[in-house]
Amino acid sequence: MKAAAFEYLRAASCDEAVAALAGEDTAVLAGGQSLVPLLNMRLARPRLVVDINRLADLSYLRRDNGNVVIGALTRHRAAETSAMVATDLPLLAAALRYVGHVSTRNRGTVGGSLAHADPSAELPTVAVALDASIRVQGSHGVRDIAAPDFFVGPHETALAPGELLVSVSFPVVPGAVSVQELPFRGCDLVVVAAVAVEDGICAQARIAVGGAGPTPIRASAVEEALIGRPVTDAVIAAAVAEFTCDPPDSLHAPASYRREMASVLTRRAIGTAVHT
Ligand SMILES: Cc1cc2nc3c(=O)[nH]c(=O)nc-3n(C[C@H](O)[C@H](O)[C@H](O)COP(=O)(O)OP(=O)(O)OC[C@H]3O[C@@H](n4cnc5c(N)ncnc54)[C@H](O)[C@@H]3O)c2cc1C
């Protein structure tokens, strides 16, 4: 199928993009890896598509005060292959390798993946695990939204009409990392974990599960049950038993199966991280 007709604007500045987005029925075009299929299948029929690909000042990776800040238009592949991300944000580097194929990641952008808000997508799950802060710009100026508040539902975010996602700031979190996925159609699950162990004791844990609910879920109870304890298999199993989720039923994977698999992957993610 071909997209329905739409108007097209190639924005020359963030201000121009924001002004254009303030109108009715608009969509941002970044890497186009999700938007273009949606347009072609006519699942999205915007009046105006605002292309931000020329906004070079939205494409950057930099350190800032204990955080790694990534511009919205930074391609997945640039983040995945960045030495700074490998050192300071290994969880993001590991998760990016699971996003589509290299050709998808060459075009797809960090901001696009967050704004698309697929509940089983890797980047939103990492953002929730690490308590990232997402900066958006609108006609009012900029505001920062904590990742758990940014993701509101499947493909639904706290972006107000007319706002552009401009950057995301990830705190640098110590620890070995693991990403575990169950990627078959209809039961996409992803678990990301960063676990720091000192003298056999868990000093810090960041764990989130994507695809087990309408938005990625921070496994806070599991983290609390790990921190300060020796990371034995028994402790990990007891901690994972604290995880609760309420996934939807589907033709391909009933809720009970997803719930069970979310626990299996969480146990595997923690175990892999602590034995790295
Ligand atoms: C073959 C294939 C495999 C894939 N596999 C995966 C996978 O395994 N995991 C995964 O997570 N994704 C996967 N995807 C989806 C895709 O990689 C991402 O959703 C996509 O890259 C999002 O980034 P983008 O820059 O392409 O966004 P676009 O497609 O341009 O936009 C996506 C949505 O976000 C909005 N948007 C984009 N940028 C902004 C912004 N700065 N501010 C506000 N709104 C914005 C757009 O309006 C649109 O609604 C796959 C895609 C393909 C084609």
Image: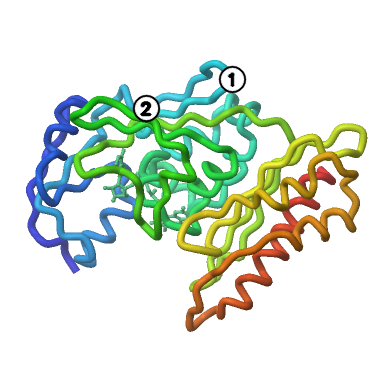
In the rendered structure, the answer to whether residue 70 lies left or right of residue 273 reads left
Give the x, y percent position of residue 167: 39, 30
The single residue placed furthest to the top in the displayed view is 65
Mark 1 lies on residue: 66
Rendered image quadrant of residue 176 = top right
In the rendered structure, the answer to whether residue 252 lies left or right of residue 27 reads right
Q: In front here: 100 or 16?
A: 16
Residue at 50% x, 33% y: name it.
79
Which three-letter amino acid code belongs to the residue tagged 2?
Ser
Residue at 72% x, 41% y: name it.
205
Instruction: Decide: few, some or many residues near mark 1? Use Cα within 10 Å; few <14, some 14-19, many ≥20.
Output: few
Give the x, y percent position of residue 115: 36, 46
The circle on residue 16 is none
Q: Is mark 1 on a helix, strand or loop?
A: loop
Gap between marks 2 and 1 measured at Cα = 20 Å
Residue 54 higher or lower than 205, as above or below: above
In the rendered structure, the answer to whether residue 51 lies left or right of residue 33 reads left
Give the x, y percent position of residue 150: 41, 44
Mark 2 lies on residue: 59
Circle nearer the N terminus (2, 1): 2
- Whether label 1 lies within 8 Å of ligand 1 gets the answer no
- Whether label 2 lies within 8 Å of ligand 1 gets the answer no
Residue at 50% x, 51% y: name it.
99
Residue 108 higher or lower than 182, as above or below: above
In the rendered structure, the answer to whether residue 241 lies left or right of residue 156 reads right
Which three-letter amino acid code belongs to the residue tagged 1?
Gly
